[in-house]
Amino acid sequence: MLEMMVVLIVVGLLVAISVPKMARVMRHERVNRAAQVVVADLQNGFAMAGRQRAPVRLTFTPTTKTYVFTDRATGTVFQTRIMDNRSEYGLTTLSSTPATVDVLPNGIGSASLTVTIAQGDYSRTVTASSAGFVRLVPM
């Protein structure tokens, strides 16, 4: 009986030590996955303007942690991405400078773009040049 109690105490201590580390790892993985999705979506957005042969507008809304690709002339929505706490990403921050960028059919953006993605104390940055070069900034 005493041996069983010692085993349970040791197992309890191991669990108590590993839970905070697992939470940190999960938070990092969510942010990294969300950053990779943003990179892919931005690359797709620059290509989308060429395929549509019309300017595409990318609009970030930090309060709802969403971004939308729309046809600049008609307002037709091509893609919406939601990254708030209700999604699998669970981000606490999704912000962009500037909040709106137009991508012309030749693949040139109206401005360079910097996107910050965060959950808790961990964040990643994605940049897109006006020429359409999108990258996840190394840590």
Image (cartoon, helix red, strand yellow):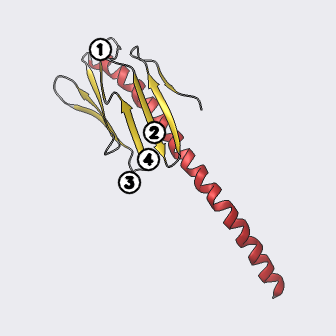
CB-based contact (under 8 Å), mark 4 and mark 2: yes
Mark 4 surroundings within 10 Å by alpha-carbon count, few (fewer than 14), some (14 through 19), many (20 or more): many
Q: Earlier in the sequence, mark 4 or mark 3?
A: 3
The relative height of residue 4 versus residue 27 in the rendered view (above or below) is below
Closer to us: mark 2 or mark 3?
A: 2
**Residue topped by disc 3:** 86
**Residue topped by disc 4:** 91
**Residue topped by disc 2:** 117
Q: Earlier in the sequence, mark 2 or mark 3?
A: 3
- The amino acid type found where label 3 is placed reads Arg
Question: Which corner quadrant holds the C terminus?
Answer: top right
Please tell me in which quadrant of the rendered image residue 106 appears: top left
Which residue is pictured at 22% across the width and 25% down the height? 71
Query: Residue 106 or 5: which is nearer the viewer?
Result: 5
- What's the distance in space between the residues labelled 2 and 1, CA to CA? 27 Å
Q: Is residue 58 left or right of residue 39?
A: left
Closer to us: mark 2 or mark 1?
A: 2
Which residue is pictured at 62% across the width and 56% down the height? 22
**Residue topped by disc 1:** 105
